[in-house]
Amino acid sequence: MHINPYGTYAVQLGVDLFNSPPRTAAELGARCADGGLVVDTVPTEADLVDACSFLEEWVAVVDAESDEERAEILNGLLARASAYPRLTNHAGDGWHMHYRDPNIALGSVVRALVSVGTALHLTGRGMSRLGRCAAEDCDTVFADISRTGRQRYCGTVCSNRDAVRRHRARAAAR
């Protein structure tokens, strides 16, 4: 039984594909499969273009300046990507919900999956749980899945580098 197949993995797939865009249709398919998506079609160049185009739209959700703006942008993405919810056991691994029409191209699957996953992530964890790294020299996108909901950096490398920078600035000011 799947509890929520569109939760964390879907928004993290969007983050991963945005931060490091796939260069080929085959890479898109492989990375989607590695991210937990059942890829049941052969990825095409049109899928790659569609997925990358969607991700350029999706990042506006990350960069929104208010919860209301974030919701408005995401609602627009959901309206263009999602279908009525339906039960499926398409992969033979248990019944779960799909929020997309069956038998659609991979680019459209990415659009629906990441849109719904982002909506579930934000409503389940908090509307501020998407962001860009706070390090001066990094603008990497992240989905905050931390327990406290206070993630500011894309990872420990940027967090540690910024801490060292702040420490050195304090030491120089003394």
Image (cartoon, rainbow, N blue to C red):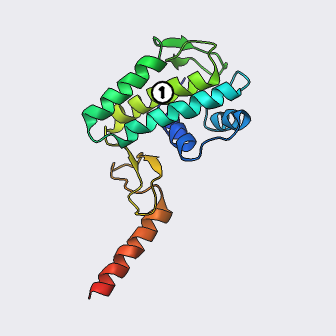
Q: Position of residue 127 (x, y in %)?
A: 31, 37
- Classify residue 137 by image quadrant: bottom left
Q: Is residue 67 left or right of residue 168?
A: left
* Residue with the mark numbered 1: 4
Classify 165 as above or below 66. Answer: below
Classify 20 as above or below 167. Answer: above
Q: Residue at x 31, y 27 (%)?
A: 72
The kind of residue on which mark 1 rests is Asn
Q: Residue at x 50, y 64 (%)?
A: 157
Q: Position of residue 140 (x, y in %)?
A: 47, 52
Q: Residue at x 48, y 26 (%)?
A: 3
- Mark 1 closeness class: few <14, some 14–19, many ≥20 residues within 10 Å: few
Q: Give the position of the C terminus as an image quadrant.
A: bottom left
Q: Residue at x 39, y 29 (%)?
A: 119
Q: Give the position of the N terminus as an image quadrant.
A: top right
Classify 109 as above or below 138. Answer: above
